[in-house]
Amino acid sequence: MDAVTLVLLLSILLQLAAVGIALRQVLEWPKLRWAWGMVTAAFALMTLGRILILGSHLEQGPGAGVVLEVEIIGLFISLFLVVGVAQLGPVFTQITRSEAQLQESQRAMSALMKNLPGMAYRCLNDPHWTMEFVSEGCVALTGYRPEELIGNRVISYAELIVPEHRQQVLENVQRAIAADEPFQLVYRIRTAQGEEKWVWEKGSAVRDAQGKVIALEGFIADITERCQAEELLRKTQDELEKLVAQRTAELDRTNRDLMQFVYTVSHDLQEPLRMMSTYLQTLRGSLKDRLQPTERSLLDLSAEACQRLQRMIQDLLAYSRAGTRGIYFEPVDANQVVQEAIQNLQAAIDQTGAQITLDPLPEVTADATLLLELFQNLLSNAIKFHAKDRSPKVRIFCQQQDDEWLFGVQDNGIGIDPDAIERIFLIFERLHPEEEYPGTGIGLAICKRIVERHGGRIWCQSKPGEGSTFYFTLPKRMPDTARQRENVGF
Ligand code: ADP
């Protein structure tokens, strides 16, 4: 076989391969069937041409018209054709896939735009906000159709913004663009039907490769209902606050009136009582030898009742003072206050052999006089209500909580029946007879008043027979200045 025959045979084989590959593309790409069919036919014709040349070469023999160099070039062309056609397949696959993806994302995008409860836009960065594109939500939002807004055909978007907001909106957008930040705005628009709506807008600038702003893109949503609901909530809140303030003031007034009444009555009662007590003593002294034992004991009982009444009046005055006296909040070292309370109770401590331990206490914002009264009442109770078989042990501690201090006064005394724990903070509520544990039942009511005037809470945990712990809180923050120097005292 001579060289020309070999080259021609190879060319024919390669061209047949090209025909085969092109034919496969016809079957794989129905959309491009015509184009690939033409390519297949062209390759088939080229192959036929080669076959005819081979036939004539074989018939006429070497040197009869067929030039080897030309056929070698033809062979290379055939080779390129095969490689080219084989490469085109994947490229087409990629193109078709991208096209399908593009169509899908366009479909998804337009579905999203249609269903968005608002309007997406692209506009020029000019004072009219000339729209280049607006989504269909434009109709529901503004009452205008997209084609009426695009290119400012009927109205520009800037004209929809109510005049009192327009300038501010434009300035805010320009400021955000200058800072290369997205903008977020809330303003009112007037729709085609003349209705006013509150809208929320978020957008940003679109820049070209040189950083020049070529458009603005963003989204605008109707928030009228939310704004109306917020407005209603604000109004209701304001009204509620006013009502609460009004009721609190009324309550304060009634409370003060009541306290004033308690104070006046107690104060006015003191004098006649003192006189009664003096007369009783004088009577007892002058009738000393002439009195029968029963008469003497009746006089003694009357004198005792007088004294008890005097104690009660004293406590009532203290209670009324705790609620009404001027209060002055200042930084107070709780350690010092407790030490002072201990000193004041030294006689009772010595008498009962009480042991008092003190954890390190903080500096608090409080009225020093009221705080002393509070600790003194709690300590005095902790000592007074001790069990008969053991001497009192009292511990005072404090824990820091988020925005308040939690104080505790713990004793090992007789404890309190859980059912009575709520009651003991009420005025004149006592769980024991006077003969067993003396007192008037006002101490804890005073404590409650003091703690509440400081904005805190007071409560008790106890196990009968084992002891009690009285807890109270004091806010760390100074109460507002209006109440700091409130002075309604007598
Ligand atoms: P008073 O001490 O004058 O009775 P308080 O108001 O201080 O009045 O206390 C009311 C009642 O609460 C007391 O009578 C007592 O029964 C009970 N109580 C108060 N503190 C304690 C305590 N530490 N242990 C047990 N009982 C207590």
Image (cartoon, grey):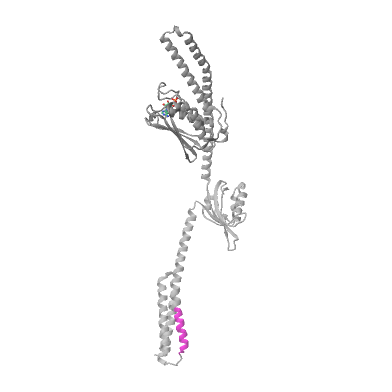
| Span shown in magenta | 66-81
Dominant secondary structure of the residues highlighted in magenta in the image: helix
Image-quarter location of ligand 1: top left
User: Can you give x and y, in whole percent of width and height, for residue 302 in the image?
Assistant: 45, 14
**Up/down of 63 relative to 183, above or below:** below
User: Can you give x and y, in whole percent of width and height, for residue 132 in the image?
Assistant: 57, 58
Q: Would residue 107 be seen by someone viewing this image from the given angle?
A: yes
Which image quadrant: the N terminus? bottom left
User: Can you give x and y, in whole percent of width and height, for residue 266 in the image?
Assistant: 51, 20
Q: Residue at x 40, y 77 (%)?
A: 20
**Is-magenta flag for residue 80?**
yes
**Up/down of 164 relative to 394, above or below:** below
User: Can you give x and y, in whole percent of width and height, for residue 206 in the image?
Assistant: 57, 59
**Is-magenta flag for residue 55?**
no
**Up/down of 262 relative to 20, above or below:** above
Nearest the eye: 170 or 198: 170
Nearest the eye: 394 or 370: 394
